[in-house]
Amino acid sequence: MEPGIKFLDPKAPVAVKVQAAIKQGDLDTLRELLDGEPELATIRIGNATEARSLLHIATDWPGNIPNGPEIIQMLVNAGGDVNATFIGTHTETPLHWTASNDDVPALDMLLDLGANINAEGGVIGNGTPLADARAFLQMKTAQKLVERGASVTLQDAATLGLMEHIEKEFAAQPGPEQETVNMAFWNSCHGGQLPAAKFLYQRGADVNYIPPWADNTPLAEAKSAGHDGLLSWLNSIEAQA
């Protein structure tokens, strides 16, 4: 945990007021609260076991709050750390959270203010904001992160159908390990990416692979997501449900 962090009980009157102002996009009330308590922007709501910054509150699910970018700008201008980490079972930053709710304007603002685009600590394999976005199929923020220079893994590329990146991974020596290829195939089905799935199948992917984080096959994943073209192809190669 970062040194010098101060905590505020979520039920404290000022905590209730500031959270409501953020969620409602109430710029005037938020400005008044920040001016009245200069340390408020740097404080964590919660305790040493679990707590989040005001920027986490501004980017929490489902995101897309009124005046979201302006709220983020105000909090950072008041001293909020754009790369503050959640205190608890993971260390996600506000960028992880906004990547997980397809909030492109908030994501752009965080990046413009210096958010680490490749910050680790995500709930998806301790990974980056992009790992969160593609795992939760938040395609707008996933694509925006790629556009803005995020590092792209094979799993990211397979989920998003980034064929140029996938082909580059296989052109390198040594190529991806079998387990990585199998995971990428599952993720291509998760994202509904038929060209990526075909490419990976041709390079030995196990069409019935079930990854550690799931309990369904690629066919079952594609079916649950309604990817009809991919489903038809998977059935043609006798993938199992």
Image: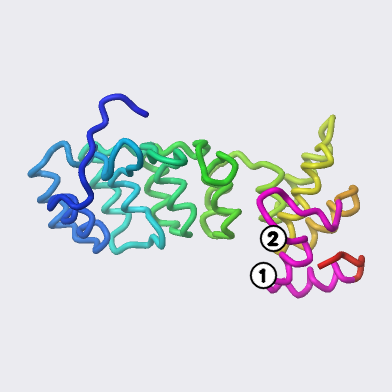
Front residue of 178 and 201: 178
Front residue of 169 and 96: 96
How many other residues sit within 10 Å of disc 2, few (<14), some (14-19) or many (≥20)? many
The magenta-colored residue range is: 206-235
Amino acid type shown at disc 1? Ala
Coordinates of residue 236 in the picture (x, y in percent): 91, 70
State which tag comes first along the sequence, 1 or 2: 2
Q: Name the residue beneath numbered marker 1.
A: 225
- Give the vertical position of 47 relative to 140 (above or below): above
Q: Residue at x 64, y 42 (%)?
A: 152
Which element carries disc 1, helix, strand or loop?
helix
User: Quick check: 173 left or right of 105?
Assistant: right
Q: Residue at x 27, y 53 (%)?
A: 70
The figure's colour scheme reads rainbow
Q: Residue at x 13, y 56 (%)?
A: 29
* Rendered image quadrant of residue 75: top left
- Give the vertical position of 129 relative to 62 (above or below): above
Q: Looking at this rendering, what residue extends furthest in the front direction?
A: 49
Q: Name the residue beneath numbered marker 2.
A: 190
Quadrant for the C terminus in the image: bottom right
- Whether pointer 1 and pointer 2 mark residues with C-beta atoms closer than 8 Å, the reply is yes
User: Quick check: 16 left or right of 226?
Assistant: left
- Give the vertical position of 169 relative to 160 (above or below): above
Amino acid type shown at disc 2? His
Front residue of 41 and 241: 241
